[in-house]
Amino acid sequence: MTKIAASILSADFANLKHDCTRLLEAGVDLMHFDVMDGHFVPNISYGAPVLKCLHAAMPDVYYDVHLMISDPARYAADFARAGASLITFHLEAVPDTAEEVIAAIRAAGCQVGISIRPGTPVEAVFPYLGVVDLILVMSVEPGFGGQKFIPTTPTRIAAICAERTRRGCDTLIEVDGGINTETGPLCIAAGVDWLVAGSSLFHAMDPAAVVNVLHSK
Ligand SMILES: O=C(CO)[C@H](O)[C@H](O)COP(=O)(O)O
Ligand SMILES: [Fe+2]
């Protein structure tokens, strides 16, 4: 079954624990923690101290940390100490030093993911299949929640999936941005393993209904 990661970017930050608990009770599988530095992307979100508090309040949750920052190696250990389970960085941020970032995240004790923007050719991540734990395919331009899903994404997911099969490895594929009950199933049909959803879950009157639709596909 496809796993659902709730992106806390769409939570009410004054009621973070309450909002996360509501979604976990609705059936989401993990929490997705978006970190933006105002440099790699034109927006600033939150950092390791917020994750540390969330992890202390809800220690049994899997925290999928999505770093949209220019210098991921520098901050990997901070996020690991704060409670990250998996740390994903952007290949575009560190095109020449991705191996060093992977090593830094592993040394900090976390699983590793690599993400690509919608405009980056999917072939860029092929060498990392079987090397990292997860490939994150962005289905919006990173930086903001609540954007519209880019329709070419399922084709990109299917291409990475086909290459994964060709290589016989088990690296997970995750998609992030504009995921809802219409776009999520298109990605599931293309072979995705994890769906990230922010606004469609946090703003739903009945988040369990959204989760049930996505889990049933
Ligand atoms: O990485 C992100 C933005 O850069 C977010 O995870 C993503 O946008 C989720 O929010 P939504 O489901 O509202 O699009
Ligand atoms: Fe994200």
Image (spheres, grey):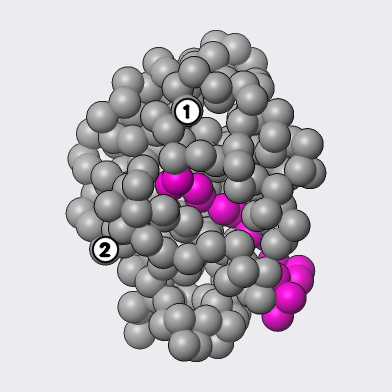
Quarter occupied by residue 24: bottom right
Assess disc 2: are there few (<14), some (14-19) or many (≥20) residues with their C-alpha within 10 Å of its C-alpha.
Answer: some
Please, is residue 117 above or below residue 110 in the view?
above
- The residue at which mark 1 appears reads as 94
- The residue at which mark 2 appears reads as 146
Report the side of 155 relative to 213 (left or right). left
Query: Tag 2's secondary structure?
Result: loop
Quarter occupied by residue 9: bottom left
The region drawn magenta spans 55-69
Q: Along the line of sight, which residue is nearer the eye, 30 or 9?
A: 9
Report the Cα–Cα distance between label 2 and label 1: 26 Å
Badge 2 residue CB within 8 Å of ligand 1: yes
For marks 2 and 1 on the same chain, the one whose residue lies earlier in the sequence: 1
Report the side of 124 relative to 49 (left or right). left
Q: Amino acid at mark 2?
A: Gly
Assess disc 1: are there few (<14), some (14-19) or many (≥20) residues with their C-alpha within 10 Å of its C-alpha.
Answer: some
Report the side of 162 relative to 146 (left or right). right
* Image mark for residue 182: none
Quarter occupied by residue 157: top left
Q: Is residue 59 magenta?
A: yes
Rendered residue at 66%/76% (across/down): 53
